[in-house]
Amino acid sequence: RHGVERGSQAQRRWDRDGHDRGRRPERDRYLLGADCSRGSWSRAGRCPRPADSDFAPHSTISAGSQALRSMGTAAEMAAEEVKKQIMEVAADKLEAEAGDLVLEGKRVYVKGSIDKGLSLGQVAQLSLTHKRGPIASIQSASQFPNQPAISAHVVDVEVDAETGGVKILRYVAAQDVGTAINPLSVRGQIQGAVIQGLGQALSEACIFKDGRMLNPTFLDYKIFSSLDAPRVEVHLVERAAEGGPFGAKGIGEPSIIPVPAAIANAVYDAVGVRICVLPLTAEKIHKAIQEKPKRR
């Protein structure tokens, strides 16, 4: 659920009911709102009130790579309604039909007469005493058509047959992202998912004994860091998805799921051993190589 309110100084305030799960999609929603209202997103005030049951109704969970689709759709709907209200208020003042007005940048003007117009600040001020009331919109969205998530990952690895150590030479990830609302953010999400997936594939493991975790800190629980991370080549395949804001679709989980399988297949192709239990540590690979002749 999203709400948009335009104050007397033409500052847009976005109130949302939903949680961010790592990618921080606020900027994407500001871009959506700015595109819908044809305004400048830089004037949109930062969301001062995140999800809060004191003012927001129940919302579905932020999961299943649906944050941008659900909150973005609500933001798009709210922005479209705000645009409609802006036109109504401006039309009364300019003595014109709403359909004859143009909203561009930070102004509303009569089509063909750019000098006959109002700033968004003036429209916001007029709305405070307008018969329809201040400009505000609250919209919600929770039902969407199912959209398949398609990813293809290719990795080149080098395996040291004497130690079982794996070196990643190149990683390429291609993904159908629908419409990339914020391409830089989308690429970062995919790159981050690949790096996290590499940790799952090669090093991350919770070790327990007698009900106690033996490696509870990052000194012993090995995650991939910037020193371990290879260059991840990302290819975005854009085809607008049904039911998403401007055709966007979820890209969170789909970009992490193929990683362990791609690594396991690459190791098998390199040294001929198939290991089906993660992580594929150097010890496991070395042991599998040593036992390989016995399996004939």
Image (spheres, rainbow, N blue to C red):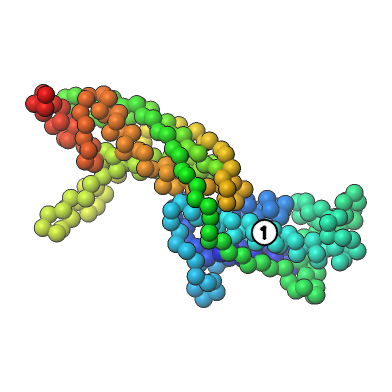
Q: In this view, does 230 lie above or below 86?
A: above
At a point 83% along the width and 63% down the height, the residue shown is 90
* Residue 223 left/right relative to 88: left
x then y, percent, for residue 228: 33, 36
* Residue 69 left/right relative to 44: left
x then y, percent, for residue 221: 24, 47
Q: In this view, does 52 lie above or below 30?
A: below
At a point 57% along the width and 48% down the height, the residue shown is 242
Residue 80 found in image quarter: bottom right
Say which element carries label 1. Answer: helix
* Residue 272 left/right relative to 14: left
Residue that numbered label 1 is attached to: 79
Residue 26 visible in rendering: no
Q: Using the image as rendered, state which of residue 119 and residue 285 is in the foreground.
A: 285
* Residue 7 left/right relative to 72: right
Label 1 neighbour load within 10 Å: few <14, some 14-19, many 20+: many
x then y, percent, for residue 130: 80, 73
